[in-house]
Amino acid sequence: MRIIGGEFGGRQLLPPQGETTRPITDRVKQSLFDIVAPHLENAVVYDLFAGTGSMGLESLSRGAKQAIFFEADRSALARLNQNIMALRVADRSRIIPGDLFKWFHRATQKPAEASVDQTVQSRGAGPADIIFLDPPYRFLTDRPDELLQLSLHLAHAHLHTESLVVFRHDAKDQLELPNLQRVDQREYGGMTLEFLRRS
């Protein structure tokens, strides 16, 4: 795993341990960032199901002003912290550990009490300009209701009219996310990238 462009281009990242995350290939990552490049300068980026931080850290390398990483797995969180420290971007990074579904529910329903991580609100993190939504493949079949609810929360409180959601999933799986409109779609082998905006 490595950063492939921008300020930290060529820098290696610590890879995930075991099978808790699904690293994206350099080829797909380059294609993806070619598409989102016009939206990255000074952007606020949410990296959902962040793993070891590849998407958010690539965004920071290419000019994003802040990346907020959401991850529940402890081993991935440890590697994510190490990658942030190695690139010296802690001042532009925030990690929100634990169940992101619960966090977004609290953040949307009770903004004054939502602060699992108060620094997100205190630094004015949302809405996001780009959201990378990369759930484990099993979520689309085993926990679709939670992804549908997450989509509603994102559209309601965390997106503006120009925000872009990048939804990566197995090409065999399909899930229409409410309040989000597909503006582009690309397929790479068995993987689909959907580019969505608030409808």
Image (tube, rainbow, N blue to C red):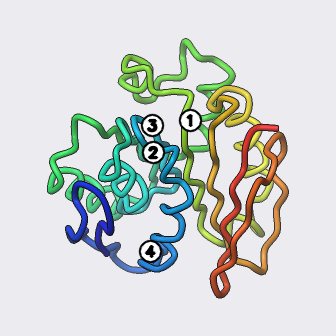
- Is residue 86 toward the left or the right of residue 192 in the image? left
Q: Is residue 89 above or below residue 37?
A: above
What is the CA distance from the residue labelled 1 to the residue labelled 3? Answer: 21 Å
Marks 3,2: beta carbons within 8 A = yes
Instruction: Nearest to the eye among marks 2 and 1: give it.
Output: 2
Q: Which residue is mark 2?
A: 40
Residue at point 30% right, 66% down? 3
Q: Which residue is mark 4?
A: 23
Image x and y of residue 45, in percent: 47, 42
Image x and y of residue 194, in percent: 70, 62
Comes first in the chain, label 3 or label 4: 4
Q: Which residue is mark 1?
A: 103
Q: Nearer the viewer, residue 168 or 138?
A: 168
Q: Nearer the viewer, residue 71 or 74?
A: 71
- Is residue 149 toward the left or the right of residue 7 in the image? right
Q: Nearer the viewer, residue 82 or 164?
A: 164
**Residue, far bottom:** 189
Q: Is residue 99 above or below residue 158?
A: below
Comes first in the chain, label 1 or label 3: 3
